Amino acid sequence: MSKEISLILTEYQARVVSRACEFYCRVYLGQFQEIPFELMITQSMSDADWCYRRDEAEKKLLEAREFIYPELHGIGHSYGVGKFEVADKAWNAYQVLRYALGDERRPYAFYGEKLPVCKVSETDDGK
């Protein structure tokens, strides 16, 4: 038997959780190129420095990915949804949250999986 757990999040918190779920899923599936992009996108640095750091990070992350997933070689290769259950669950949570936050793409479940429930309500707490 499983428990149902409810979370009450502010819009900002929901956006953070949504991005974290997407990031977790993509990295778990071998999309390591997301790591420098996600971590560096908010940093202020010159374009040349940003590109150099991104390129160097991608080289090292490709090596790390091939160590973890020897069957994935080169840029653009990763697993897809359905390979790891934990990644699928994170992807489903991401989809439901991004939809609740206004993204028009409807969430969909793979392999008959039930999507998490997300309810949006307005509060009048003066914040």
Image (cartoon, rainbow, N blue to C red):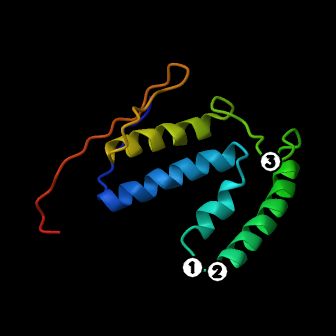
Q: How far apart in space, not on screen, are marks 1 and 2 (Cα)?
A: 7 Å
From the top left corner, tell me how far across and down residue 76 is, in percent. Answer: 76, 43
Q: Quadrant of the N terminus?
A: top left
Left or right of residue 66, residue 91 in this image: left
| Identity of the residue drawn at 73% across and 67% down | 54
Kindly identify which residue carries mark 2: 46
Instruction: Please rate how many residues cluster around mark 2, counting C-alpha atoms within 10 Å: few if below 14, some from 14 to 19, many from 20.
Output: few
From the top left corner, tell me how far across and down residue 121 is, in percent. Answer: 19, 47
Q: What element does badge 3 sit on?
A: loop
Q: Is residue 25 above or below residue 107?
A: below
Q: How far apart in space, not on screen, are marks 2 and 3 (Cα)?
A: 25 Å
Kindly identify which residue carries mark 3: 75
Q: Quadrant of the C terminus?
A: bottom left
Kindly identify which residue carries mark 1: 44
Q: How far apart in space, not on screen, are marks 3 and 1 (Cα)?
A: 26 Å
From the top left corner, tell me how far across and down residue 45 is, in percent. Answer: 62, 80
Q: Earlier in the sequence, mark 3 or mark 1?
A: 1
What residue occupies the far front of the structure in this picture?
48
Residue 70 occupies quadrant: top right
| Identity of the residue drawn at 61% across and 67% down | 39
**Nearer to me, 42 or 100:** 42
Instruction: Please rate how many residues cluster around mark 3, counting C-alpha atoms within 10 Å: few if below 14, some from 14 to 19, many from 20.
Output: few
| Identity of the residue drawn at 68% across and 46% down | 28
